[in-house]
Image (spheres, grey):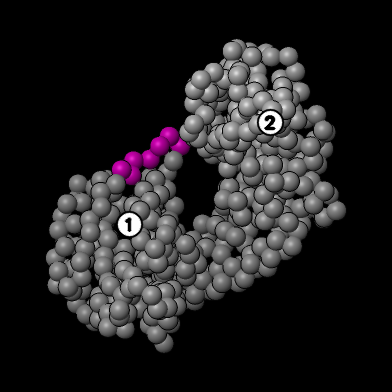
Amino acid sequence: MIADAGLQTLRAALPAGGQPVTVHVAYSGGRDSHVLLHWLAERRARLAPHRLGALHVDHGLQPQAAGWATHCHRVCAGLDVPLEVVAVDARPTSGESPEAAARAARYRAFAARLAAGDLLLTAHHQADQAETVLLALLRGAGPAGTAAMPPRRRLGAGWLVRPLLDWPAARLAAYAAEHGLDWVDDPSNRDTRYDRNFLRHAVLPQLAGHWPDAAAALARHAVHAGEAQALLDDLAAVDGCTETTLAVSRLTPLSPARQRNLLRGWLRWHGAPVPSQRRLEELLRQALVAGADRQPCLELGAHAVRAWRGRLYLTPQPLPPAPAPQRWHLAEPLHLPGGGRLWATPAVGDGIAADRLGAPPCIEVRFRDSAGAPVGLKQRLQRSGLPPWWRGQVPLLFGGGRLLQVAGQAPLESARPGQGGWCVHWTPPADAVSVQAR
């Protein structure tokens, strides 16, 4: 029954009809991934017309890595499964754990190799799920964290699927013995300095000695936490988490717990990390008390949350620098660094007077940091409708050393009736468009 459930999980993730896709097994050479690969190779007819393949990642961290890749090639050849070996740089950055660095490098490599609709299968099982739940609990995580590993989630252009998530570790061991499988042993998996290894070798065996079904119970908790989190996500959507920018007025009538849930949901919906409880409370406090003239900012890694005029904005961190000035010949559109585009159409009695632009017509495109201080520029940028931190991205159109137009606004002096002119149009960068969608 367990094996059938795993196959159902896999088949449910495969596209119905259309072009065949590739089902990639993440094959480390260890016991668990060998069981998954062998189990699927025995059932490949039930995957038709989809293809079965294997991916092996060389993290470059162990001297035995070349031997492991050779072992994987031998096993895959025996099973008639094509194998691709991918080398990655898994060295941790400052402050990053070796486990996290290796995992991030591995999944980047996997995601890069998935075509649309492809599946990546990992051999995570019930004991792995129990470890993940315990790690989340020890971090003080809520339902989103203790929901642990879902059976299926998006990865790149395809899907990550865990068909063995309901398999007890003993079931994998029995399968490997029954089929005479051989595998490589990564010595780092026994190093209890790493959190997961400590739980695997020192904690879970103690729990199982007193509670034989501890791993299964913890895995069930993950299912319950996932259902609870789904309900919280539904509530956050009702409260407005899908909005591009979040109105503070959405938060004020809610209870404190519901305010926090809305903020968490809004950040997750837009791909930003959820901060700790303490930092979330600080963000909430700043958002609720910020006056119209204040712009509090909370940094969240590669993102920041900024408050302005009663709304919360999610921006890159750091903000992109203002583009360098450049000359623009109006006959062709101008694609701006960081996104955005300028283009011009000829007109009569409208736009910038053509006699100010020369022949062929040309404009100098500047930005606030390179524009000097033309009279009234600050007020004109305020009228752009963009928050202060995006105003440095507004193109300023100059001719003969004079400011002729702020992109998105009317020219300072329009062409007279009957006079030739150029109407300049501006598509802002995607991020700037999103902050204007209020």
What percent of the width, then of the height, locates residue 227? 62, 71
Element at label 2 = loop
Span shown in magenta: 89-95
Q: Amino acid at mark 1?
A: Arg
**Of residues 219 and 81, the one drawn nearer to the viewer in this rendering:** 81
Q: Which residue is mark 1?
A: 113
Q: Amino acid at mark 2?
A: Asp
Report crowding for label 2: few under 14, some 14 to 19, many 20 or more residues within 10 A (C-alpha).
Answer: many
Give the vertical position of 14 relative to 256 (above or below): below
Residue 26 located left or right of residue 166: left
- Tell me the CA gap for discs 2 and 1: 52 Å
Q: Which residue sits at x=80%, y=52%?
A: 250
Q: Quadrant of residue 269?
A: bottom right
- Verify whether residue 324 appears in magenta: no
Mark sitting earlier along the chain (2/1): 1
- Verify whether residue 94 appears in magenta: yes
